[in-house]
Amino acid sequence: MEILTKLWESILGILGDSAFVSLNWRNYVMILISFLLIYLAIRKQYEPLVLLPIAVGMLLVNLCPAIALGGSTELIPVDVYNADHPGEIVTYAKTVIDGVTYYNKPTSGGLLFYLYQGVKLGIYPPLIFLGIGAMTDFGPLISNPKSFILGAAAQIGIFITFIGAIILGFSPTEAGAIGIIGGADGPTAIYVTSILAAELLGPIAVAAYSYMALVPIIQPPIMRLLTTKKERSIKMTQLRSVSKLEKILFPIIVTVVVALLLPDATTLIGMLMFGNLMRESGVVDRIAKTAQNELMNIITIFLGLSVGSTATGQVFLSWKTIGIICLGLFAFCMGTAFGVLFGKIMCKATGGKVNPLIGSAGVSAVPMAARVSQKVGQEENPSNFLLMHAMGPNVAGVVGSAVAAGVLISILG
Amino acid sequence: MLENLKLGLAILLTGIVIVFSVLVLLILIIKVYSTLVYNAQNRISEKNSEKEKNEKVETAKSEPAAEKAEAAVVEEEPQEDDGTVPGEIVAAIAAAIEVIFGEGSVKIKSIKKSSKRRSVWKSAGVAENTRSF
């Protein structure tokens, strides 16, 4: 009989601790959203490398919130503890409550809490930038440095959205984090948000990566709307070849200039350019390959899981998230539009030598945005090859969004 | 709210001005150093080609005719090797020509490797003819 009672108590205890009792409806909605994201990542292949870890992080934290909770302190009566651990030299701090002395025994946190520290302390995004730098060829930008103008123009969306977010009632720091979605750069968005408004990390990261995945759907209508058929058909002259020395000097010069002018952008730009220097120097192939493959992959897993773990039902299911998703889309569209508009200005200024479609690649989603420029250009003129021309503004956009991030952090941080 | 809006406008202007200033400055710096590097490398390559020319003239003068003929035979072998265009490059050139002129409209009879050191006039001619691509 006693055994049966113990069995019953154990079952009740397990059920009491189970997710069925502790979760509320918000968690279940988030679990369904995570299923949708997993579907989009696997079936539709929307940025699967990032979306899948984010979705799984979201799923885990809503199934078991403790997985993302930090360590706490457990109060154990001294006599009970000593009875259970005879002969142990105890070093825990003591607390006296109502005449009873307790040991403050620290307990460890969940796995995702520790992984999240890399986001919170701003470690993962710069390391991702290191990998991006090691993978990026800045040749098209060096051979046509005017592309920087288009990379800068596409960042205007960030600052316009900032005002939009303020009008909708977000605080200035939240508005800064929301605006950076317009830079279409996941690591930059996460980096800025972790500094300015860490509580919005989940919705902002999901919005940023979702829009980056939707570049081929969002950008073409805007590009067609703002350009004429004649402009879209413009063929651009071949880019000059860039020497190795120029490619080696580029990361060094950009780092020095940006760091001197805008110290807050040094972390992102410094890592981006260090990665690129490793690539271009040609003397550290082993670590360059590690940065662009193994390190990048490991950090992507950690970053995705920990960002997903911030999307708990209580945080994610709010009007703020809907506002962030709408403003993020607005920022992205504005970035694309300003890129194309400045492309048109450059087209006029050069007497029709620049195809304005390459302006949309100024949003940094590399290389997707450049591919979209190529695709839309080729629809009008099948013998038109804009890809390498669009890569210039595209990589300039990465530098531009890091500079914009530095501006926001230095003013609002 | 009004204060936040003022802050928003200030950030909008500051952000645009700083982002454009930094990137325009980078344009200028890149242009300057690109020109410097390009000029320096041109000068070095010109010097090297002049040196090689002089050396060739000197060896041609000093070596007897028989030796010269032998050297020419020896030199021909690596030249033949160098002249062979790898299959991947032939495929790439053929694909590019098909894209430009349309499928099946052009028949490629031969692809020859041009000499590595073109004179300035030849380079200018090639640049002029290939600009439209």
Image: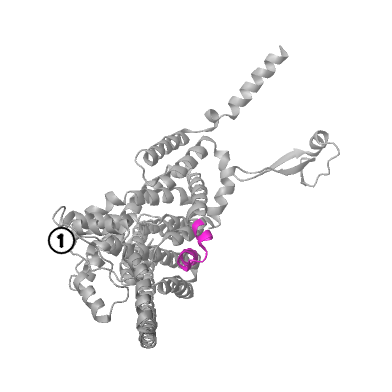
Give neighbour class at mark 1: few <14, some 14-19, many 20+ (Cα, 10 Å).
few
Q: Give left or right: position of B44 versus A90.
A: left
Expressed as whole percent of the image width and height from the top left, the position of residue A413 reads 49, 64
Expressed as whole percent of the image width and height from the top left, the position of residue A270 reads 49, 67
Q: Give left or right: position of A104 versus A342.
A: right
Judge whether residue B123 can be spotted in this image: yes
Expressed as whole percent of the image width and height from the top left, the position of residue A175 reads 40, 58
- Residue assigned mark 1: A228
Judge whether residue B16 can be spotted in this image: no
Foreground: A223 or A21? A223
Expressed as whole percent of the image width and height from the top left, the position of residue A64 reads 54, 36
In magenta, the rendered stretch is: A270-289
* Chief SS of the magenta region: helix
Label 1 is found on which chain of the structure? A
What amino acid is labelled 1 in the image? Thr
Q: Quadrant of the N terminus of chain A?
A: top right
Foreground: A39 or A22? A39
Foreground: A291 or A53? A291
Q: Is residue A223 magenta?
A: no
Q: Give left or right: position of A220 versus A309.
A: left
Residue with the most extreme right position? A87
As displayed, is residue A373 above or below residue B57? Answer: above
Q: Is residue A284 magenta?
A: yes
